[in-house]
Image (spheres, rainbow, N blue to C red):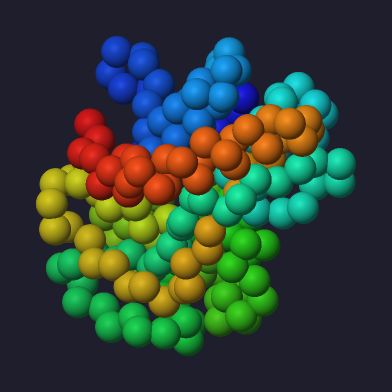
Amino acid sequence: MGLNFSAPWAYADEQGSLQGIDHDIVYQALSAAGYQVQIELFSHERMLQKFKQRELDFASPIAFDIPGAHKSLPYMEIQDVAASLSSAGLAIEQLDDLSDKRVVAYQKAIDVLGQPFANVLESQNYLEMVDRDRQFDLLFSGKVDVVVGDRLVLEYYSRKMYGEGKIRIHPIFASQVYPAAAWDPEIIKAFNQHLMRMQARGDIKLLMHSPRP
């Protein structure tokens, strides 16, 4: 099983134990279905590569169709946002407000956020990178004005690295709900069954709001 390495969704704590919202959902659902669950964490690009090469039986999250793969019910709600320094006092209320900003985003952000996002960016003022620490280094050193990424991830990293209240969130993108995928349709069938049970019991809501170290 492969998951995208991104706290608080799936990551390792200081003792090296894997945890996170998506980790716990996948582990609990598939364990309840009777599967031996072995989870590995990868960058999203690496996870997709290994899944497409069938080195992984299951991968999450999946944003695009993969020929031959079976997708689960959508369950992983992600809202990409723009984040700026609270001290900068930037007014970012719509996509066009990014047009004069220096922006750093996650790898393949343009593919995910689409042409409207690409259209407002000046190429010389836009970077994509995997390294979240480096993104925040650029923001807090004043080398970029805005970081674009998953709201939960940005809030987690900012709080952990710099403390509460240092960034301002600008919710200028619509949220998306992503599925997992597997090659074996029986895995997806079992995952969906237990996913729905977890949703009905309120387990997923609880995992979403649990504090993460």
Is 170 on the left-hand or right-hand side of 41?
left
- Tell me where residue 46 appears, x and y as whole percent: 66, 33
Q: How many marks?
A: 0
Q: Residue at x 53, y 59 (%)?
A: 177
From the viewer's perspective, is residue 28 above or below residue 115? above
Q: Residue at x 15, y 68 (%)?
A: 87
* Residue 45 shows in this picture: no
Residue nearer the viewer, 40 or 157? 40
- Tell me where residue 14 appears, x and y as whole percent: 28, 18
Residue nearer the viewer, 161 or 209? 209
Quadrant, the N terminus: top right
Q: Quadrant of residue 120?
A: bottom right
- Tell me where residue 154 appears, x and y as whole percent: 34, 52
Q: Quadrant of residue 143?
A: bottom left
Is 147 on the left-hand or right-hand side of 155?
right
* Residue 66 shows in this picture: yes
From the viewer's perspective, is residue 92 above or below residue 103? below
Residue nearer the viewer, 29 or 119? 29
Q: Residue at x 86, y 41 (%)?
A: 68
- Tell me where residue 159 appears, x and y as whole percent: 20, 46
Residue nearer the viewer, 198 or 154? 198
Quadrant, the C terminus: top left
Is 5 on the left-hand or right-hand side of 155?
right
